């Protein structure tokens, strides 16, 4: 078996080069009666007894075709491994429906474990962003025992209201210390699109929800930072597409670039939106569904993440059972949005070495 350190170095070499000798195939499995397309990545010349990874994309329109995800999957296959990236149809449609998505995740793990290229029982699960806590929840499923070796969460969340508070204000805290960043609004657009009209007193706000869905879809299709001023003309058009008495509500979620949402309005919307999310889609709140853990969990989060703050992975680590095999690594090299590289070559080198150490721990799971 190739050591974790060597596999991590192979990943790093492939990631930096942006290319590797990998065979890519289109495959399909079925979630009940629904066909689910997937991309399978295999190292060239290696087709048997490989460790396997199921990699979950986040809530993004490009889905498994996202440029960064493709680069990650190819680098992971070079380690060497069989990498399966399923299309989660709800997530590419920006629908937050974990009760429907969890069967996709579990079926993908079983499908990869059954493939002839994969060593039986040596399959890991990697979830990005929203997929991180969903991956941890899926790992507790009884039908995956003996098939799943470990789960990895990149940039996940733990607490609904705290995450929403950050996405509106950029404020978060951990162990009594307060932190602030300029938040990426994409997450609150997606949550609003899915659950705003589920708030009883906002049941007529479907036009605002649809406007937020169109805004998030445009940012996702263009694969651009949701904070970019180029989206302001679209915001203005969408704002005028909603009823006049609900435009202030739209402004809470999608103000013009450089303007902050009204703090009083933000406090009120979080107070009603969190319970609506929990009532409509209980699995959106991971806390009640994190036990029992039967496989190791590794959490990685970027310190400068502006979509979901690093304190959420720290909180997820603290919420998992004390006797569980759980590790947390914070890094300066991974974040949802662009423009978060360390400011000096020395810091980049140090962060790269630390990230390779985190990758070694991850790759040793399978």
Image: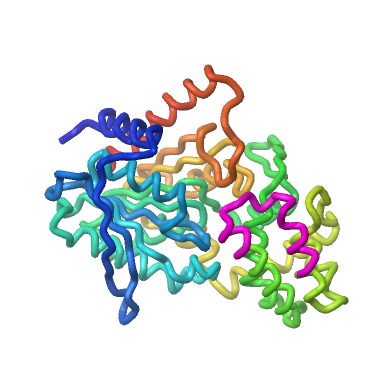
Above/below status of 364 relative to 278:
above
The answer to whether residue 27 is above or below residue 120 is below
Q: Position of residue 270 (x, y in %)?
A: 73, 62
Q: Position of residue 42 (x, y in %)?
A: 23, 49
**Residue that appears at 41% across and 55% down:** 136
Q: Is residue 366 visible?
A: no
Q: Nearer the viewer, residue 77 or 289?
A: 77
Which quadrant holds residue 5?
top left
* Nearer to me, 30 or 173: 30
**Which segment is the magenta one?**
217-237
Task: Determine which quarter of the picture holds residue 265.
Answer: bottom right
**In the rendered image of this protein, does residue 298 appear above or below residue 38?**
above
- Residue at (32, 76) in percent of width and height: 35
Residue 211 on image: x %, y %: 70, 71
Identify the colour scheme used. Answer: rainbow
For the point 83% across and 54% down, which residue is it?
A: 263
Q: Is residue 240 highlighted in magenta?
A: no
Q: Residue 22, can we see it?
A: yes
| Frontmost residue, 326 versus 335 | 335
């Amino acid at each position: 078996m190739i050591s974790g350190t060597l596999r991590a170095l192979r990943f790093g070499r492939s990631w930096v080069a942006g290319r590797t000798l990998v065979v890519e195939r289109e495959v399909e499995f079925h979630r009940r009666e629904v066909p689910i397309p997937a991309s399978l990545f295999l190292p060239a010349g290696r087709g048997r007894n490989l460790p396997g990874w199921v990699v979950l994309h986040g809530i993004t329109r490009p889905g498994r075709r996202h440029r960064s995800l493709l680069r990650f999957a190819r680098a992971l296959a070079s380690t060497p491994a069989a990498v399966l990236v399923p299309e989660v149809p709800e997530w590419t449609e920006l629908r937050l429906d974990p009760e429907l998505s969890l069967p996709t995740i579990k079926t993908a793990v079983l499908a990869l474990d059954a493939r002839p290229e994969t060593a039986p029982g040596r399959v890991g699960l990697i979830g990005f962003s929203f997929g991180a806590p969903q991956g941890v929840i899926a790992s507790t499923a009884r039908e995956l025992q003996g098939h799943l070796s470990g789960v990895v969460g990149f940039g996940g969340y733990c607490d609904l209201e705290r995450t929403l508070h950050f996405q509106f204000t950029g404020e978060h805290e951990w162990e009594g210390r307060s932190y602030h960043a300029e938040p990426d609004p994409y997450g609150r657009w997606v949550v609003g699109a899915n659950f705003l009209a589920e708030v009883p007193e906002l049941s007529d706000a479907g036009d605002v929800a649809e406007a937020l869905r169109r805004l998030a879809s445009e940012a996702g299709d263009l694969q651009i930072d949701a904070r970019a001023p180029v989206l302001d003309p679209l915001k203005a058009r969408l704002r005028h597409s909603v009823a006049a008495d609900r435009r202030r509500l739209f402004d809470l979620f999608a103000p013009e670039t450089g303007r902050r949402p009204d703090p009083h309005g933000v406090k009120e919307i979080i107070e009603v939106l969190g319970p609506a999310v929990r009532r409509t889609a209980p699995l959106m709140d991971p806390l009640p569904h994190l036990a029992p853990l039967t496989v190791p969990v590794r959490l990685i989060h970027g310190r400068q993440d502006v979509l979901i703050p690093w304190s959420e992975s720290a909180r997820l680590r603290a919420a998992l059972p004390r006797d569980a095999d759980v590790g947390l690594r914070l890094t300066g090299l991974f974040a949802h949005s662009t423009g978060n590289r360390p400011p000096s070559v020395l810091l980049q080198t140090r962060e790269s070495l630390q990230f390779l150490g985190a990758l070694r721990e991850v790759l040793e799971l399978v």
